[in-house]
Amino acid sequence: MFPNGTMKALTLSYDDGVEQDRKLVEVLNRYGIKAAFNLNSGIQTGANHWAGRDTEGHEVDIRRMNVRGLKELYASHEVAVHGLTHPRLETLDGETIRNELEQDKCNLERIFGTAVRGMAYPFGTYNAQVRAIAGDCGLAYARGVNSTYSFEIPPDLLEYQPSCHHADPRLMELAERFINLKPAVPQVFYVWGHSYEFDTGRNWPLIEEFCRFMAKRDDIFYATNAQALLGV
């Protein structure tokens, strides 16, 4: 059960710590909706960038943010591990996997001055070894990228899969179903993505519409990932 006796929680999750997070955080804060932002502390610098294309073929600059100011930017939200350098963890040896997760966790805890409890697997991929090392590193939940179209909380939080991506055609259908849900056990609507996809998809109004529809409901707990899944 969540605060105020509600059985429903909404949480979002965004990867890579890119410049577009600034606009996304402004939208989320305006509607009182919370998220986890999954960062790669080993490459968290504006020098790390790449080019994307929007739906009309225009180039979109996708650039990780410099560390300075991120503590203030994400103050109302959660920061979580995404790997030190965003590798495909399942392709690495155990010692390197551990370094990727432990060092990212330690760096984020030092930068943000808070305990880091969770992560999003880079590329959404992992294997049994990666999952086990994540747990050994003190991570209590870890998210993939496969849509469940469900709100159920699985027994193994280190193999957590989201309800859907923010650009999924079923997003608003799921939102309406969640609004009308009257569950007897806790349920979590978990939406994930990358904020730069709002530029490449030219669909910033999508997140505005979603947040406006979901906001200010007495029977929903607006939570970070750790609050929704761990109660912290």
Image: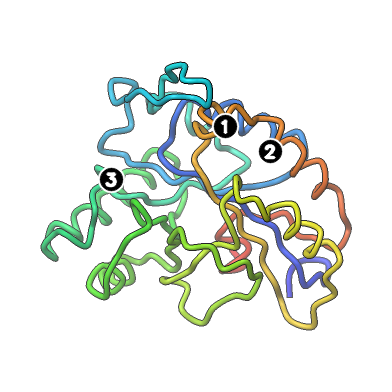
Which residue is pictured at 82% across the width and 46% down the height? Answer: 213
Label 3 Cα neighbours within 10 Å, binned few <14 / some 14-19 / many ≥20? some
Tell which residue pokes out farthest to the front in this image.
Answer: 56
Point out the image quarter for the N terminus.
Answer: bottom right
Which residue is pictured at 38% across the width and 57% down the height? Answer: 124
Side (left or right) of 57 relative to 137:
right
Which residue is pictured at 23% across the width and 48% down the height? Answer: 87
Which residue bears the numbered disc 1? 198
Give yes or no for contact between labels 1 and 2 (Cβ–Cβ under 8 Å).
Answer: yes
Badge number at residue 207? 2
Image spot of residue 89 (x, y percent): 23, 57
Which amino acid lies under the numbered mark 3 shown in the image of this protein?
A: His
Q: Nearer the viewer, residue 175 or 8?
A: 175
Label 1 Cα neighbours within 10 Å, binned few <14 / some 14-19 / many ≥20? many
Which residue bears the numbered disc 3? 86
Q: Nearer the viewer, residue 202 or 2?
A: 202
Q: Nearer the viewer, residue 142 or 80?
A: 142
Query: Disc 1 to disc 2, how far (Cα)?
Result: 8 Å
Query: Disc 2 to disc 3, how far (Cα)?
Result: 25 Å
Image spot of residue 216 (x, y percent): 86, 48
Q: Quadrant of residue 137?
A: bottom left
Which amino acid lies under the numbered mark 2 shown in the image of this protein?
A: Ile
Image spot of residue 71 (x, y percent): 49, 34
Side (left or right) of 191 relative to 60:
right
Point out the image quarter for the C terminus.
Answer: bottom right
Q: Nearer the viewer, residue 82 or 126?
A: 126
Give yes or no for contact between labels 3 and 1 (Cβ–Cβ under 8 Å).
Answer: no
Which amino acid lies under the numbered mark 1 shown in the image of this protein?
A: Phe
Mark 1: which secondary structure?
helix
Question: 85 above or below 23?
Answer: below
Side (left or right) of 100 relative to 106:
left
